[in-house]
């Protein structure tokens, strides 16, 4: 039997508009319950929703970035269901005529390209949030629930992929690329932990080319849990098939703490949303000139930028992926490159020490105390052998902590290493004269002696000799 | 097209309606009549006619993305039968 894993994703991204989808309530995250609500998003009778132009523009922009076709005339539908997180008892969504459809996004993984089909990108409104009160703390066994509609009505783009992904690794890479795309377009905050970016997955195992039973997985709140949940489910399904068990088409819930998926209590009947055209909202017919204007707003997208970084700057795959995963990080790098320093060195410093410092301090790159120009200065100091790489790490840390420029720090601390050939030459001569035995051993080819002599040079210069130059000088004089 | 008692029960469940046996039978007959009427209409030749989702001759009605003040919190839950600390309280969901 030959097994193949088949995965498709359904992603929801909250759009970062100032106001909600169909009313003027602000879209701020958090806040006391129901402080950002009005008769429209509370579903009072007799109100009239009006679509937010910016949300429509954002969705078209996303569609264009994902190579989708823009539908000449699309409409909204009502999706009917009874659940208290939607005060209207229906969600305004799109059904058979989405705003954009039929595109693709290409993911590169270990040199292989995978073109993932995008079935559709449509626009809908987000739901409210329920807090379940009771001993269990969960929906099951709760005494009652509290509803907060601050989130209800926030514009939500839904992106559905074709079942084109072939492994949990690919699914994660796709999701990361999609996140980066949304971030580059600056249309969503993309915070999986805060729920502004959410992902559900369909996974099945094809056996000898025959389609398997599809299982939907929910509640994956990070790239890590997406990967873990899919890996778990992949294993579970393969094992079941090998055991001759029959898989059930169902929705399963990922339990991150336990590291397992378990079935959601099955509904007695399949969902029946009774979609029908939303009578309060008129159709959308995007003016071709408007679409072209939006197309003109498309920035260089993450995959293009990654490929350019590799070619233009000679960056490794790993570092290029890391730098282009966030627009601001890639921008920072390119501004640092403008200082004329070696791009590969600059990239290494950013991807290594700088990103670690930012992470520790929980500071976004946009507010990095060390400006790109400062990083260029640091790399220049190393290149000119004013300071060693080891010293540079300390200088970087201090520049990050204090906001001072690297040059300023090096000067103030008297850190600059002795890279002056004449000065160093004199020191090396002194060391050789003072340690005739070691010098003799060195002439005899003993490695240990070089280390000893280097140590003496460093001691004499209080660690400020350029190690490479000092070592070269000793070798030149004693071999 | 006739619909069954099971169909009526399904639709009633989706709408969260509790129906007596008599009501189910009444609605079964009435809904069948409605569907029969729809069937007659569906005999009209609509070849080449776009489905009508809206009767208004309007498209692209948008508002600018400008936030305006929301409802004062005390008014938000003032009509709610059950509320606590600004949140709507609802009975146990499942
Ligand atoms: Zn509102």
Image (tube, coloured by chain):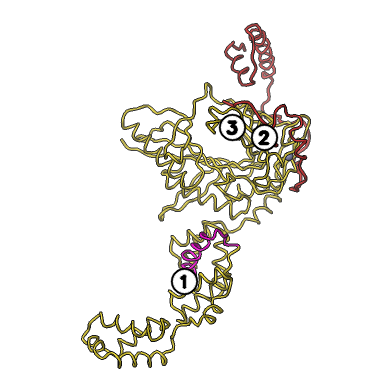
Chain colours: A yellow, B red
**A361 falls in the magenta region:** yes
Residue A214 picture quarter: top left
Q: Which residue is mark 3?
A: A133
**Chain containing the residue with disc 1:** A
Residue A209 included in the magenta stretch of the image: no
Q: Which of pointers 2 and 3 indicates the residue nearer the eye?
A: 3
Judge left or right: residue A433 versus residue A67. Answer: left
Work out how far the residue at label 2 is from the one at label 3, CA to CA, in angstroms.
28 Å
Local crowd size for mark 1, using a 10 Å CA cut-off: few (<14), some (14–19), many (≥20): some
Residue A468 appears anywhere in the view = yes
Q: Which mark is residue A92?
A: 2
Residue bounds of the magenta highlight: A346-366
Q: Name the front one of labels 1 and 2.
A: 1
Local packing at callout 2 (Cα closer than 10 Å; few below 14, some 14-19, many 20+) is: many
Disc nearer the start of the sequence (2/3)? 2
Disc 1/disc 3 C-alpha distance (Å): 51 Å
In this picture, is A398 found above or below A215? below
Element under disc 1: helix
Ligand 1 is found in which quarter of the picture? top right
Instruction: Confirm if mark 3 falls within 8 A of ligand 1.
Output: no
- Which of the two labelled residues, at mark 1 and mark 3, occupies the earlier sequence position? 3
Q: Which residue carries the number 1 mark? A: A393
Q: Nearer the viewer, residue B46 or B18?
A: B18
């Amino acid at each position: 039997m030959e097994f193949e894993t088949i995965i498709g994703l359904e992603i929801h991204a909250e759009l970062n508009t100032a106001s909600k989808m169909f009313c003027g309530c602000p879209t701020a995250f958090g806040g006391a319950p129901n402080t950002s609500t009005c008769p429209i998003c509370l579903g009072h009778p007799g109100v009239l929703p009006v679509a937010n132009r910016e949300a429509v523009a954002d969705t078209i922009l996303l569609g264009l970035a994902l190579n989708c076709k823009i539908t000449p005339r699309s409409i909204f539908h009502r999706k009917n269901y009874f659940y208290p997180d939607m005060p209207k008892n229906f969600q305004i969504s799109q059904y058979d005529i989405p705003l954009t459809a039929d595109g693709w996004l290409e993911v590169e993984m270990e040199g292989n390209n995978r073109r993932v089909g995008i079935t559709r990108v449509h626009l809908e409104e987000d739901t409210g949030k329920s807090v379940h009160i009771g001993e269990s703390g969960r929906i099951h066994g709760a005494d009652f629930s509290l509803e907060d509609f601050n989130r209800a009505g926030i514009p939500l783009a839904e992106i559905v992929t074709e079942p084109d992904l072939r492994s949990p690794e690919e699914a994660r890479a796709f999701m990361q690329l999609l996140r980066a795309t949304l971030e580059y377009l600056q249309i969503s905050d993309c915070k999986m932990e805060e729920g502004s970016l959410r992902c559900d997955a369909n996974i099945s195992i094809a056996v000898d080319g025959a389609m398997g039973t599809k299982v939907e997985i929910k509640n994956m709140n990070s790239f890590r849990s997406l990967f873990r949940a899919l890996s778990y489910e992949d294993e579970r399904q393969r094992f079941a098939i090998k055991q001759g068990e029959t898989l059930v088409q169902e929705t399963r819930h990922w339990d991150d703490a336990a590291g397992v998926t378990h079935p959601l209590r099955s509904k007695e009947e399949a969902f029946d949303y009774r979609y029908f055209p939303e009578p309060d909202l008129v159709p959308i017919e995007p003016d071709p000139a408007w679409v072209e204007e939006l197309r003109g707003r498309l920035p260089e997208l993450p995959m293009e930028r990654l490929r350019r970084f590799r070619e233009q700057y000679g960056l490794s795959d790993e570092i290029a992926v890391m730098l282009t995963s966030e627009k601001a990080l890639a921008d920072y790098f390119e501004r640092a490159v403008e200082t004329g320093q070696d791009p590969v060195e600059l990239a290494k410093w950013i991807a290594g020490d700088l990103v670690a410092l930012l992470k520790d301090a929980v500071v976004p790159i946009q507010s990095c105390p060390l400006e790109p120009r400062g990083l260029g200065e640091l790399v220049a100091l190393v290149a000119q052998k004013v300071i060693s790489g080891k010293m540079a790490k300390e200088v970087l840390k201090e520049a990050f902590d204090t906001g001072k420029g690297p040059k300023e720090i090096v000067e103030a601390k008297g850190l600059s290493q002795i890279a002056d050939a004449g000065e160093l030459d004199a020191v090396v001569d002194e060391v050789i004269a003072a340690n005739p035995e070691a010098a003799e051993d060195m002439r005899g080819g003993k490695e240990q002696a070089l280390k000893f002599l280097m140590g003496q040079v460093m001691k004499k210069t209080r660690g400020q000799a350029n190690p490479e130059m000092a070592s070269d000088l000793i070798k030149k004089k004693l071999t | 097209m006739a619909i069954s008692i099971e169909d009526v029960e399904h639709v009633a469940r989706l709408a969260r309606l509790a129906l007596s046996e008599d009501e189910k039978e009444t609605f079964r007959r009435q809904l069948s009549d409605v569907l029969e009427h729809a069937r007659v209409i569906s005999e009209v030749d609509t070849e080449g006619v776009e489905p009508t989702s809206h009767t208004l001759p309007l498209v692209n009605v948008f508002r600018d993305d400008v936030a305006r003040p929301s409802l004062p919190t005390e008014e938000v839950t003032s009509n709610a039968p059950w509320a606590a600390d600004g949140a709507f309280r609802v009975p146990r969901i499942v």
